[in-house]
Every structure is written in C-alpha cells, then in structure tokens.
Image (cartoon, helix red, strand yellow):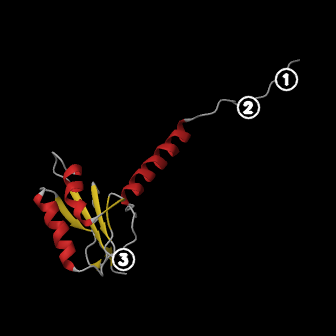
Amino acid sequence: MALQSKHKVDAAFSMSSMTDIIFLLLIFFMLTSSFITPSGLPVNLPSSEASDIVMQEVTVTVTKDLKYSVNDKIISREEIKSELTKLLKGKDGQVVLHIDKEVPVEYLVEIGGIAALLEANVSIATKPYK
C-alpha cells in the first residue's frame, strides 16, 4: 500500500517578483540622482516662490568668498569663459548658476552674460521657501 501526499510542494524559485523589485529600485535611484545638485563648493542659495528642478548639463558655482567652479572643477574667474565654451561647444546647453545669496549681483550678471553669449539657457538655482 503506497501512501502519497496530496499536497506537492514545488521547489522552484520564481524570479519574476525579484526582477520587478530591482527594476523599481533602479528607476527610483535614477530619478533621485538627477535631483541631487553637485556640491563641489558649499553655497547658501537664495529662496524663491517657484523653485523648478531642471536637468543640469553645466553647473557654475560661486561661493560667498568668490571661489568659482564649473561642474565641480575649481577654476579662476578668468577661466570661466574658456571652460563654458569648451563644455557647450556645438550644442545648445543648459547652464545652472549656483550663486551664494551674499555674492553681489554683478558676478551673477557676468556669468549669465557669458552663458547667454554662448547661446545656452541660463537658470538660477534657488531653494523653496519653508
């Protein structure tokens, strides 16, 4: 007399739910990484009512003690035009200005003018009001 179990347990492991979870995590990290701003130099951004998030192709940072960086590469004030020309060569780019709120407006206008001369779209990074 042979006794057999009515409930057979399948020992196979289904990977479909695991791949779904990995795919969702991949999407999450890709989206959140695009919102993170590079922080080569620490700046205290001004606040504004409308703080839009844009894809950052080229980032120019000016600290309150007038240190300059382009895409986390620290440069001098005289090198800004040549560095932006090199990065924006042959394409219409997006330049995001991370200017400390204590920096005089003339420096903002100078860098914005250089980027506009190179036919780039210029955005000013701000933080939203709390």
Amino acid at the residue labelled 3: Asn
Callout 2 touching callout 3 (CB < 8 Å): no
The location of residue 72, given as percent across then percent down, is: 36, 59
Q: Which mark is residue 105?
A: none
Q: Which image quadrant for residue 68?
A: bottom left
Q: Residue furthest top?
A: 1
Which tag, 1 or 3, sits closer to the chain's start?
Answer: 1
Amino acid at the residue labelled 2: His
Q: Which residue is mark 1?
A: 3
Few, some or many residues within 10 Å of mark 1 (<14, 14–19, 20+): few
The location of residue 70, given as percent across then percent down, is: 30, 59
What's the residue at 19%, 67% (across, down)? Answer: 111
Question: Going by the image, does 118 lie left or right of 124?
Answer: left
Amino acid at the residue labelled 1: Leu
Is 84 above or below relative to 26?
below
Closer to the camera, 2 or 110? 110
Secondary element at image label 1? loop
Q: Which residue is mark 2?
A: 7
Query: Residues under labels 2 and 1: Cα distance?
Result: 12 Å
Secondary element at image label 3? loop
Which image quarter is the N terminus in? top right
Closer to the camera, 33 or 113? 113
Which image quarter is the C terminus in? bottom left
Question: Going by the image, does 47 lie left or right of 30?
Answer: left
Q: Nearer the viewer, mark 1 or mark 3?
A: 3
The location of residue 59, given as percent across then percent down, is: 29, 60
Q: Which residue is mark 3?
A: 44
